[in-house]
Structure formats: structure tokens, C-alpha cells
């Protein structure tokens, strides 16, 4: 086995790529890249009934979005291919025959019904259910008779019945299993397809994988893999089992916790660099209290020894906060590229932008990005930049637009703003504050009704700078509209709850 570090991410293309898959892929990538090693992508499609090309495409999409690349794989090849298990069946068959010839494996003719009956009997007796080994020593006559009945055998590994299997895990430490509690596992199904146990052991060996980094749920499988490696005279790789990822209720992360597919988070408006940062901190410590770390900073500090064996909690609120930090610090041009298709999809901005219109959009994004935590909410929080069709929030109605003095303030302000020959944040501010001074009231008593009339909200970025980005005529029209609606009593608070149009405060 070479000295160079070689790891693999080996997903099964049977569904969406969930956060646990992404976490495993990321930690394999971090270890390989931090050690100057190689990352292998291997597709474990031995579940022939559930594996699909569509699911494989989702895996590729999720990895690429997260920024996890690979050095060998089905799409780019490599020296140890093929990298899809269904294309390696003849390879597995040779290893199975070695096991059978050495009496380390045997044919099992038990039907699913008989196996379930065995398990029920063991449960009734208070015994942990496992295969009872009834086919271990069948004679040739027995096998011929069972075949004549139309039964197709699977192949089982003959595991040790006494002693202990010891796993020295980089993250979990030493884990000991009692061999007497292990039933002989199936390594080849009746269909002829290998099970996970056989395929993963053979592939890791032939692809010269030095470190197997996977979820802790696979730790019990490792006792079987070590015995299988011993039976085949294969040197085991080093194992590192990552901790569980729990939902906020401290149960295993699942669909009931909301979006758990990587692509779901992309659609919700998470930046890949933010999700990369967040996932890296689940079960790994950078050695400081820092939480916002660049990809390079994470790579420079990463080690398996700094990983925790304790479960980590996928805190959506914290992930959202972190995403907001990344959006705030991102280049406005980049964020504009990301939000543009979302705005176009909702019909808020034209499909073909002129250079001037795009420059305007970048200014809007630059003003708003520190207040947006998810890209998907940009179109609602910044709606008033793109259309006059927005709702007046209840708090805006209650605090400012339902006051008897509001219509006069807004009409007077509209007149003065309409008369401006220069439309800039400075001239707008001077006009607003000048009106307040003339009316002998606090500036806030003009600023807040103005914001409510122009945006429908009570919170947002600098009022004068956001008004500068709106057309002068649109601002005047919005002020007059709100004044008329307020005077007619049509802006009284409603019973309807506000739909958030700005970041939580």
C-alpha cells in the first residue's frame, strides 16, 4: 500500500444527497487536501433496485455546489476503475470464490420468511436476533435438493463465533465487539450482486484506500469488514468514524427537521462557502473560538485528531446567521449574479438588463446585503425597489400610517421632493429634515412615515440612500398614494399577521 494518503467518498445513488452525505464528503476532502492526498469518488450502486442515474446526477450537483472535487471517479476515470460497483461484478466474484474455496463463506438457501421466523423466535426468547447459521455446513445433497425446490442461494461470510473484534478508530477510539453476537452476514445477494460489506472491502483494497472516513452509523459494519479483510489476507485501512449529526431536538437529522438535502439549502439561498464553513465545524474544532473561517483557513488547521466523537447539532438558526455573515461580506457584484435569476423568476426585473440597469441592481444589492440572511428572501425584503405592488405591514400601519397627521406630512413632503432639481441622498435628507424643522417636530416623525409610505415597512437600510435608488417620480407617487389611503382610513391595522419583509431584529 502506498504512503500517499488516499480517501474515498462512496455514495449510493438511491435518493437525494442529504447533509450527512455532504458532511462525510467534506471531511474526506479536507483530510485528503490537507495531507496532499487523493480524493476518490466511487458510486456504490449495488442496491440495483433503487439506484438511479437521476440520483447520481443529484450527488454530482451537490458536491460541485459545495466545492468538493475529486481526483478519480466515474466521470473522469483513474488508474483503479471502473468506479461504479455495478461495473465491477466480475472482480467481486473472484474474491467470493476465494472465500468459498477457503470455507470462509458458504451458500445460504434460507427464504425471507424463514429468516423472519428465526428473528421472531430469538426476540421471543430475549436473544438479540442474528442468523443462526443453519446453512453453514450443508452437504452437497442438501444443496442439490434445495436447488431442486427452486431456491436461489445467497452467500454468507463465516464470521468468528468466539473472541473479540477490536477497532482502533482515529475519532472514536478503541471499540470492542463480541464476536458471539455477530450473525454471518450476507456478502452476495441471490441476484448475484455483492452487498455493501463485500464490495466496500474489495474496492477499498484494490483502490488502495489508506483511510476510510465515514459516518459513525457504519461502526458496527467495521467489525464485519475487519473479519472479511482477515479472511482475504487484506491489510485494513485506518478507520475514522464521524459523529452523528442531530436535529435541534437532539434526534437524528431527518426530513422532519426541514430541508436536509444539500440542494434544498442551495435553493433556500445558502451560499456554498457558508455551508462549507458550517459543515466543517460540525464535529471538528479549529482550536479557537472563531466561527467564520475561509476554506483555506479550515484546510490549514484540519486534522482528524481534532474531530469529536460526540454528536453535533445541525442548528438551522446558526447556519442562517453564518450565511448572513457571508452575504454581508461578499462582493456586491457576486451577490447580484446570484439574486438576479430569483428576481427574474418572480417577474420583478427584466430578463435582459442594460449595463446601466445592472449597475443599479448592484447598488441595490450593496445597500441590502448586510440585512439579508438568505438569498431566497431578497425578493421579498427588497421588493419595494422593483415594484409599487407591495403590502403595508401592520406595524407600519399601526405606528405611522394610521395617524391623523400623517396625510398632511406626506403630501407636503411629496411636494418638496417633487420640486428637487437634484435627486441624491444628500438633497433628500436635507429636504426631509428641513420639513421636520419647519413643522417643529423631531426628524423621526417625518422619516418613519416616509419609510412606511415608500417601502411599506418600518425597518431597512438608510432611508435616504434607498430613496436615491428609486425614481424620483415613483417616490412622490408612493407618498401621495399613502397619504390618500391614510386620509380615507384604509391604512388601519388589520388582523392579518405581517409577512417578514426584513431580517429578524
Image: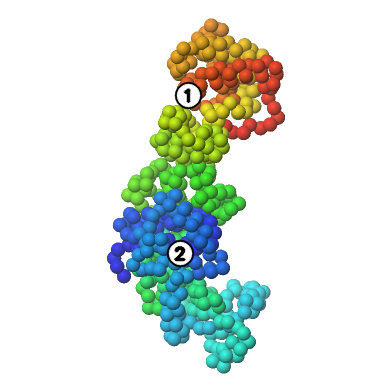
**In what element is the residue under mark 1?**
loop
The percent position of residue 374, horizontal first and vertical second, equals 51, 39
| Residue 94: image tag | none
231 versus 438 height, above or below: below
Q: In the displayed image of the protein, which residue is found farthest to the bottom?
A: 141
Residue at the disc numbered 1: 469
Q: Is residue 445 above or below residue 13?
A: above
Decide: few, some or many residues near mark 2? Use Cα within 10 Å; few <14, some 14-19, many ≥20: many
State whether residue 385 appears in this view. yes
- Residue 422: image quadrant is top left
Q: Position of residue 350 (x, y in %)?
A: 51, 34
User: In x, y percent, where is residue 143?
Assistant: 56, 89
Q: Return the mark for residue 43.
A: 2
Callout 2 secondary element? loop
| Residue located at (42% from left, 68% from top) | 167
Location of residue 417 in the rendering, given as x and y in whole percent from the top left corner: 52, 13
Please state if 18 lies on the left or on the right of 399 as rendered. left
Task: Identify the residue at image location x=51%, y=83%.
Answer: 106
Check whether the beta carbons of the residues at disc 2 and disc 1 lie within 8 A of each other: no
Is 222 drawn above or below residue 293 in the view shown? below
Counting other residues with Cα less than 10 Å from the Cα at mark 1, is it few (<14), some (14-19), or many (20 or more)?
A: some
C-alpha distance separating marks 2 and 1: 51 Å
State left or right for residue 109 relative to residue 91.
right
- Is 50 or 165 nearer to us in this picture? 50
Asked if residue 449 is positioned above or below residue 224 in the image, the reply reads: above
Quadrant the C terminus occupies: top right
The quadrant of the rendering that contains the N terminus is bottom left
The numbered mark, 2 or 1, whose residue comes first in the sequence reads 2
The residue that appears at 62% across and 19% down in the rendered structure is 481
Residue at (46% x, 77% y) in the render: 163
Amino acid at each position: 500500500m502506498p504512503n500517499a494518503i488516499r480517501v474515498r467518498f462512496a455514495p449510493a445513488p438511491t435518493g437525494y444527497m442529504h447533509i450527512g452525505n455532504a458532511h462525510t464528503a467534506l471531511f474526506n476532502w479536507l483530510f485528503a487536501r490537507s495531507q496532499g492526498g487523493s480524493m476518490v469518488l466511487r458510486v456504490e450502486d449495488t442496491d440495483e433496485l433503487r439506484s438511479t442515474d437521476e440520483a447520481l446526477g443529484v450527488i454530482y450537483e451537490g458536491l460541485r455546489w459545495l466545492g468538493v472535487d475529486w481526483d478519480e471517479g466515474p466521470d473522469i476515470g483513474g488508474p483503479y476503475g471502473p468506479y461504479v460497483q455495478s461495473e465491477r461484478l466480475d472482480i467481486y466474484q473472484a474474491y467470493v470464490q476465494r472465500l468459498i474455496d477457503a470455507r470462509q463463506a458458504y451458500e445460504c438457501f434460507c427464504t425471507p420468511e424463514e429468516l423472519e421466523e428465526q428473528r421472531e423466535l430469538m426476540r421471543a426468547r430475549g436473544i438479540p436476533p442474528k442468523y443462526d447459521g443453519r446453512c453453514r455446513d450443508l452437504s452437497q445433497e442438501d444443496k442439490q435438493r434445495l436447488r431442486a425446490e427452486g431456491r436461489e442461494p445467497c452467500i454468507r461470510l463465516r464470521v468468528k463465533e468466539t473472541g473479540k473484534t477490536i477497532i482502533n478508530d482515529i475519532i472514536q477510539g478503541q471499540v470492542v465487539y463480541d464476536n458471539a453476537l455477530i450473525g454471518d452476514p450476507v456478502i452476495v445477494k441471490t441476484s448475484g450482486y455483492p452487498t455493501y460489506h463485500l464490495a466496500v472491502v474489495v474496492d477499498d483494497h484494490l483502490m488502495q484506500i489508506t483511510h476510510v472516513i465515514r459516518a459513525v452509523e457504519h461502526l458496527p459494519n467495521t467489525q464485519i469488514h475487519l473479519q472479511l479483510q482477515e479472511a482475504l489476507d487484506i491489510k485494513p485501512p485506518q478507520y475514522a468514524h464521524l459523529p452523528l449529526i442531530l436535529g435541534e431536538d437532539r434526534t437524528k437529522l431527518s426530513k422532519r427537521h426541514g430541508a436536509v438535502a444539500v440542494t434544498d439549502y442551495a435553493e433556500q439561498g445558502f451560499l456554498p462557502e457558508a455551508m462549507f464553513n458550517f459543515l466543517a465545524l460540525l464535529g471538528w474544532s479549529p482550536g479557537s473560538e472563531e466561527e467564520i473561517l475561509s476554506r483555506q483557513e479550515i484546510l490549514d488547521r484540519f486534522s482528524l485528531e481534532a474531530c469529536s466523537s460526540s454528536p453535533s447539532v445541525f442548528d438551522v438558526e446558526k447556519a442562517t446567521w453564518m450565511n448572513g455573515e457571508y452575504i454581508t461580506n461578499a462582493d456586491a457584484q457576486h451577490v447580484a449574479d446570484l439574486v438576479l435569476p430569483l428576481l427574474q423568476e418572480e417577474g420583478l426585473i427584466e430578463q435582459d438588463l442594460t449595463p446601466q440597469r445592472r449597475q443599479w441592481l448592484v447598488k441595490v444589492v450593496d445597500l441590502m446585503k448586510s440585512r439579508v440572511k438568505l438569498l431566497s428572501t431578497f425578493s421579498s425584503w427588497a421588493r419595494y425597489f422593483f415594484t409599487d405592488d407591495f403590502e403595508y405591514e401592520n406595524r407600519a400601519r399601526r405606528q405611522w400610517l394610521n395617524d391623523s397627521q400623517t396625510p398632511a406630512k406626506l403630501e407636503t413632503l411629496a411636494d418638496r421632493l417633487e420640486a428637487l432639481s437634484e435627486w441624491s441622498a444628500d438633497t433628500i435628507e436635507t429636504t426631509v429634515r428641513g420639513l421636520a424643522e419647519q413643522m417643529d417636530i423631531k426628524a423621526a416623525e417625518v422619516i418613519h412615515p416616509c419609510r412606511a409610505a415608500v417601502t411599506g415597512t418600518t425597518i431597512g437600510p438608510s432611508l435616504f440612500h434607498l430613496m436615491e435608488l428609486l425614481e424620483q417620480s415613483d417616490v412622490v407617487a408612493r407618498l401621495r398614494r399613502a397619504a390618500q389611503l391614510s386620509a380615507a382610513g384604509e391604512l388601519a391595522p388589520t388582523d392579518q399577521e405581517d409577512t417578514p419583509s426584513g431580517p429578524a431584529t
